[in-house]
Amino acid sequence: MEQVANSKGHLMRVEEAVEVLTSDRPSRYLFERELAVAAFSGWLNSPDDPQGATTTVFAALCGAVLQAREHGINPPIEWLTEVYDDRAYMQLLENVIAIPIFWLIDEHKSYNNCNYTADVVRFLLTFKPKSEDKRKRASLGKAWEFINKHGGFVRGNFGRDRKDWCSISNHQVLWRRYKRSAPLQCARFHGAKFDWYLDPRQPDFFQRLSATAARKQELKTFFSAALHFQLELKAIIDRRSMAANDFFQFPDMLTPLDVRLPAMTATAYGKMAAYRRSTNLSEPVWD
């Protein structure tokens, strides 16, 4: 389970945040939905950063306290029992409280690992070879070649003067770190499309959390699309490269929404016609 610690209180888990954002029930305490948006967006932007969600929620709590004070409201005890706790705060102090590195280096301004993960899933779900030969089917190795050798869906526009995104070995590392978020990244950039770039450095951060939390139907559509992509991915990906417990745990009451991704072009298939498994692939299951 992804978490955003457990002592007298607990940190809001990412799965818990999704349950809050997809449920029709009233909020159980002040700003529950806003804090859920912070927990989820902090993890989605930085799934490889152990403190990504934690620091984002801390920034949101600071904004929530200011909002409560402005309206003469005492912060509810649930902020410390349901969302945050003292141990998490002390851990942040030990590392110097900061924002996620994702924002420190302005990852959101150009193509990034979130985009890359989304493109890998889009390739896996839309690459449909005419041959029934298992060696011709979509694979993580083919996804790497399509994106890094043939420009991928952005036609080589990776920014920062880069002609590719990563080496095959870094591709494997990146997938291991991001695969739990992969269907959600695909929905974010290619499916229902939802802006999760909520910058905790900005003075209007909490206002943006509130605006996002208020988009109830759009949030349901986003998560339902992500669930659809996850079910499709489960049906085709090799279990040795993505086991059952690697997939995100969506709320039981959520139903998938069939969202069609753009089909691969004839040009793209032409580029992949000469694919040969890379000798740098350390695991055959990636081919």
Image (cartoon, rainbow, N blue to C red):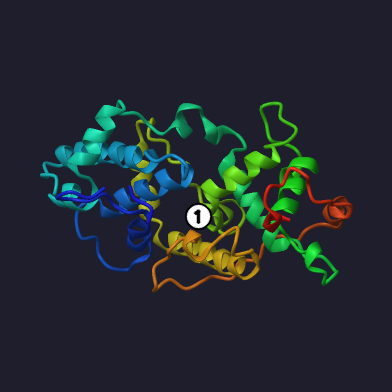
Residue where numbered disc 1 is placed = 180
Q: Residue at x 34, y 28 (%)?
A: 98
Three-letter residue code for mark 1: Arg
Please tell me which residue lies in front, 73 or 261. 261
Please tell me which residue lies in front, 201 or 18. 18
Placement of 113 over or under 267, stated as above or below: above
Where is the C terminus found, in terms of image quarters? bottom right
Is residue 261 found left or right of 62 in the rendered image? right
Q: How many marks?
A: 1
Q: Which SS class for mark 1?
A: helix
Give the crowd class for mark 1: few <14, some 14-19, many >=20 residues within 10 Å: many
Q: Residue at x 26, y 49 (%)?
A: 11
Is residue 10 found left or right of 43 in the rendered image? left
Where is the N terminus found, in terms of image quarters? bottom left
Placement of 114 over or under 223, stated as above or below: above
Residue 82 point in image, percent of width and height? 21, 53
Residue 271 point in image, percent of width and height? 86, 50
Placement of 142 over or under 198, stated as above or below: below
Residue 17 point in image, percent of width and height? 34, 56
Is residue 76 found left or right of 56 in the rendered image? left
Residue 14 point in image, percent of width and height? 37, 54
Q: Residue at x 68, y 59 (%)?
A: 124
